[in-house]
Image: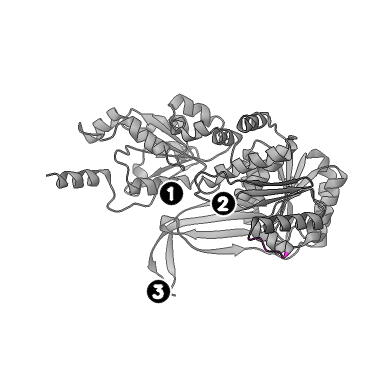
Amino acid sequence: MIKMNLEVYLNKLEKKKILVIGDLMLDKYFFGNSKRISPEAPVPILLKKQDKVVLGGAGNVAYNLKSAGQDVSIMTVIGIDENGKIAKNIFKEHEINTDLVIEDSERCTTVKNRFIGQNNLQMFRYDEEITAEVNEKIKKQMCSLLEKNIDNFDVIIMSDYNKGFLKTSNSAEIIKICNLHNKKVLIDIKEPIYDKYKDAYLLKPNLEELSNITKMPVETQDEIIEAAETLKKFTNCKYVLVTLGKDGMLLIGNNIKKFFDCLSREVYDVTGAGDTVISYLSTCLANNVDIDNSVLISNYAAGVKVGKMGTYGVTIEDIINYINLDNYIDIKNKIVSLDKLIKIMENKNNKKIVFTNGCFDIFHIGHMRYLKESSTYGDILIVGVNSDNSVKRLKGKNRPINNEDDRMELLASLGFVSYVVKFDEDTPYELIKQIKPNIITKAGDYKIDDVVGKDIVESLGGQVIICKYSDGKSTSGIIEKVLNIYK
């Protein structure tokens, strides 16, 4: 009954105008291989293969809101620099309004640069940032912009990463303006200062942030409740929502003291789950969903997010499928015809599509590693699978070992695979032409110029990526080993 009610709420969610105010970051990733040590110093050398840039901090909240189907604007500060231009272009690509973005010649745009070696191992990170408090001119400008535009918005989110944009004085002023205009303000807190968040509608700390601001222990449920009630008391907020990782969430209100169990079934990446929570919480509250069901929907959204690798914007459809346990467990829903896949792609909401293909006759660790890596390059991973007839033409009359239905079901059971589609031709060229992916990936034994569909994806502004090769891992090798055993 509860799940059916949630589906009703989700299907009735309308597009609302939501403003995100907070610290923007760009997350840059540089992927490559490291096989030797520098002769200049005892440090590894990373040979770059590709890179990507995604929105972080308040930008990731805005991206999540857009994935939830909302009309999103962002207020933040960026430098007058190349990274600021990149940020604006990404916002434009995702149709996120930047009219309230402030440029500051005294600051740089915050960037986290991550260098990733083979097997997705992060080697090191360096940051570009100025965390000093923004000057009085910027503070006045942001409050003035908010005052002039606040009636255009249904809900306000403050995404605080303690990078200097939101400090006690201007945060308090933002909350005051929101309250004067009867606008709910939800805050993802960071800095351990009560006055900074006083009179907000809802505060969302994690356990560490709750302990830091209250100076109280949070080891047991009773301690967490006491600390959350203390935070509510000293900030005079209406609600406190504490995210507890694998232990779920705790909601505290005047007449509410409720734990929500963790709903994740597979955990691949917890990064950004908090941004997903506050995005769906604000979306639901903007649509007048009651607080209990708003938190429950946000909890399901987080369950979807942690089951995805990398940056992923959870859609309402994702949550409905997740809530519908039978549909979620029935992996055959991920096995689709080309016609159905084309319809799904029509509503991809600016999500980056990754395509790869193969026979996947006897599935092995090499397959798993390269598919998992492929999933990190976009939001949706589509796997094209050669039909039985196609495999016979390519591999001989004794292949495949496993029929097409079994091969497709196995692939669909992988949490990082979004859809599986069969093709009967020798190559997936016509399939790629219909899907129009942003990225095509292949395993490391391929050369970029030999990849089928390279011309299609590059003509659309996309790229081909060759994933790391797992030496000695192949279906033919497994078959040969088995035959030798029984000779």
In primary-sequence order, the first of circles 2 and 1 is: 2
Residue farthest to the top? 339
| Residue bearing mark 2 | 246
- Amino acid type indicated by mark 3: Pro
Residue farthest to the left? 487
Report, in whole angstroms, how far the alpha carbon at label 2 lies from the one at label 1: 25 Å
Q: Is residue 439 left or right of residue 130?
A: left
- Amino acid type indicated by mark 2: Lys
Estimate how packed mark 1 is, as few (under 14), some (14 to 19) or many (20 or more) residues with alpha carbons within 10 Å: some
Report, in whole angstroms, how far the alpha carbon at label 2 lies from the one at label 3: 44 Å
Q: Could you tell me if the residues under marks 2 and 1 are in contact, i.e. CB atoms within 8 Å?
A: no
Q: Position of residue 272 (x, y in %)?
A: 59, 50
| Residue bearing mark 3 | 39
In primary-sequence order, the first of circles 3 and 1 is: 3
Q: Quadrant of residue 48?
A: bottom left
Magenta: main secondary structure: loop
Q: Position of residue 85 (x, y in %)?
A: 64, 51
Estimate how packed mark 3 is, as few (under 14), some (14 to 19) or many (20 or more) residues with alpha carbons within 10 Å: few
Q: Position of residue 372 (x, y in %)?
A: 43, 47
Residue at (36, 44) in percent of width and height: 449
- Amino acid type indicated by mark 1: Glu
The structure's colour scheme is one colour
Q: Is residue 40 left or right of residue 137?
A: left
Magenta region: 215-219
Report, in whole angstroms, how far the alpha carbon at label 3 lies from the one at label 1: 30 Å
Label annotation for residue 373 = 1
Image: 112 above or below 422: below
* SS state under label 2: helix
